Image (cartoon, rainbow, N blue to C red):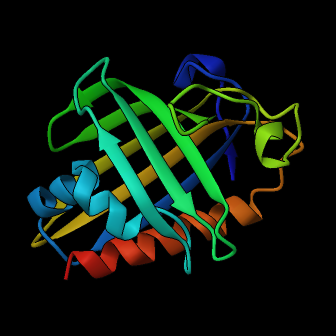
């Protein structure tokens, strides 16, 4: 867990950082991360499915993703792509949403109403021989937020992501 200044990320709060090495070339990792059909195969923690994924992958474009819990409850998220450096870096906002893509409070999903409406996700991709170094920064989390569940959820999603790269 790290804390970044507003100047470094454009957003204040705690930052969850996860680093992975994927056993696939950067082009394949990039494509799997940015493709809506691929996202349906990896989005969400273990035992969750992703029945819907729409990605308008361009600066100013949006995404809308749904992850379905084992109990059938849907959790929607949306964001806007702020920066795209092809094959290197993506910066996007991250918010809870309804099924139409409207930003909603975390309280909509039974979480604290104090949870920020907008977070920021930055992912980077670097060559490591025939593998790819991948780093995720999820920024803007409230200071009191326990990052364990979020870290677990992201890591389980990234385990699924690694599986689709095989």
Q: Residue at x 84, y 46 (%)?
A: 111
Judge whether 89 appears above or below 75 on screen: above
Give the percent coordinates (x, y) of residue 23. Answer: 22, 78
Judge whether 129 appears above or below 17 on screen: below
Q: Residue at x 62, y 22 (%)?
A: 11
Q: Residue at x 28, y 72 (%)?
A: 22
- The tally of labels here is 0
Q: Nearer the viewer, residue 153 or 27?
A: 153
Q: Nearer the viewer, residue 133 or 163?
A: 163
Left or right: residue 52 versus residue 1 is: left
Q: Nearer the viewer, residue 95 or 53?
A: 53
Asked which quadrant contains residue 114, the reply is top right
Judge whether 21 appears above or below 87 on screen: below
Give the percent coordinates (x, y) of residue 50. Answer: 44, 63
Q: Name the quadrant of the C terminus.
A: bottom left
Give the percent coordinates (x, y) of residue 86. Answer: 15, 36
Q: Residue at x 16, y 54 (%)?
A: 31
Asked which quadrant contains residue 76, the reply is top right
Give the percent coordinates (x, y) of residue 125. Answer: 26, 51
Judge whether 152 appears above or below 2 on screen: below
Q: Nearer the viewer, residue 14 or 93?
A: 93
């Amino acid at each position: 867990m790290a804390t970044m200044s507003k100047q470094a990320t454009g957003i204040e709060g705690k930052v969850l950082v996860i680093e992975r090495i994927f056993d696939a070339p950067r082009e394949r990792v990039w494509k799997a991360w940015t493709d809506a059909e691929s996202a349906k195969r990896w989005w969400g923690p273990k035992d969750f499915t992703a029945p819907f994924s729409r990605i308008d992958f361009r600066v100013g474009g949006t995404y809308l993703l749904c992850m379905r819990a084992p109990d059938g409850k849907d959790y929607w998220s949306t964001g806007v792509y702020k920066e795209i450096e092809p094959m290197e870096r993506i910066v996007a906002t991250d918010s809870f949403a309804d099924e139409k893509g409207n930003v909603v409070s975390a309280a909509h999903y039974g979480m604290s109403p104090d949870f920020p409406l907008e977070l920021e996700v930055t992912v980077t991709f670097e060559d490591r021989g025939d593998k790819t170094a991948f780093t995720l920064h999820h920024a803007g989390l409230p200071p009191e937020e326990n990052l364990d569940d979020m870290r677990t959820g992201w890591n389980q999603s990234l385990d699924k992501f690694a599986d689709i790269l095989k």
